[in-house]
Image (tube, helix red, strand yellow):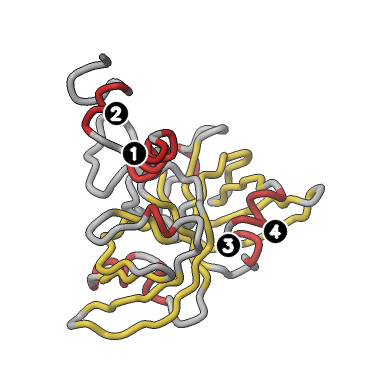
Amino acid sequence: MFTGLISDVGVVERLEPRGGGARITIRPGTIPVDELELGESVACNGTCLTVVERGGGRMSFDAVPETLARTTLGSWRPGSRVNLERALRLSDRLGGHLVQGHVDAVGRVLARVAEGQGARLTISLPPAVAPLVAEKGSIAVDGVSLTVAHAGRDRFEVALIPETLTRTILGDAAPGTPVNLEADVVARHVARLHEFGGSSGVTEGSLKDWGYGGGAR
C-alpha cells in the first residue's frame, strides 16, 4: 500500500528481456538501496513492483508480460525517468490517499496549460476507469496522488502545484505522454456494491444489508 506522495525520482538503467517479461534495473536518486529488503514493494510510476536484487546504488524488479502490456512500463527505455515511492508503514502519515499500486489503465495527456505557477493537465479517461473518477475525488497518475479538478466521460483534469511539477516526472508531461492511472480504491468498492445492487442501485437499506451503517438486518 502507498500514499501517492512521491519520495524520489529514479532513472532506468537496464531492461533485460526474460520470457516475455523483463528485469528492470533502476538507479534511484535518494532512496538508500542498501536499506531495501529483497521482496520489498516499491511503486514505480504507480506500479507496485517487488525488489529482486539491490546493490551498487541500483535496484532491480521483474515485470511479467501482463504488467508490460497493461502499464507504461512496456514503453520504458534506458534513461526513462520514474516516480518512486516505498511502501507505506502503518505508523506513517497518510498525506495523499490509499494507493495500491494496481494500475487500472493507461491514459494519455491531451493538453497542458499553465495555471498560475502550476499547470493543468487534461488526460484521457479509458471507459473501464471512467465510472470510478469523480470531481474532487482522488486518482493516482503515474503514482502521484492528485485531486480530480474536472471529470468528463472520456477525459479528466488535474491541477498541479509547483511542488508536484518539481518533484515528480509530471513536470515533463506534455500532450501525447502516456500515464498510468489508478482509481481510488473506495470508488472501486462503491462500484462493486452498485453492481450487486441490481436495478435499485445502492440505497440506505442495501448498505445496511451489506453490513454498513448500522449492521446487517
Whole-percent x, y for residue 11 in the image: 53, 63
Whole-percent x, y for residue 202 in the image: 30, 38
Disc 4 vs disc 3: Cβ atoms closer than 8 Å? no
User: Which callout, 4 or 1, points at the residue further toward the start of the chain?
Assistant: 4
Q: Secondary structure at mark 3?
A: helix
How far is the residue under mark 2 from the one under mark 4?
49 Å
The quadrant holding residue 160 is bottom left
Residue at 34% over, 39% down: 200
The quadrant holding residue 140 is bottom left
Residue type pointed to by label 4: Leu
| Residue position for label 1 | 200
| Residue position for label 4 | 15
Disc 2 vs disc 4: Cβ atoms closer than 8 Å? no
User: Which callout, 2 or 1, points at the residue further toward the start of the chain?
Assistant: 1
The answer to whether one can see residue 122 in this image is yes
Query: For the view shown, which residue lies furthest in the right direction?
Result: 19
Residue type pointed to by label 1: Ser
How far is the residue under mark 4 from the one under mark 1?
50 Å
| Residue position for label 3 | 72
How far is the residue under mark 2 from the one under mark 1?
9 Å
Residue at 51% over, 51% down: 103
| Residue position for label 2 | 206
Residue at 59% over, 70% down: 79
Q: Nearer the viewer, residue 5 or 114?
A: 114
Whole-percent x, y for residue 182 in the image: 44, 52
Residue type pointed to by label 2: Ser
How far is the residue under mark 1 from the one under mark 3?
38 Å
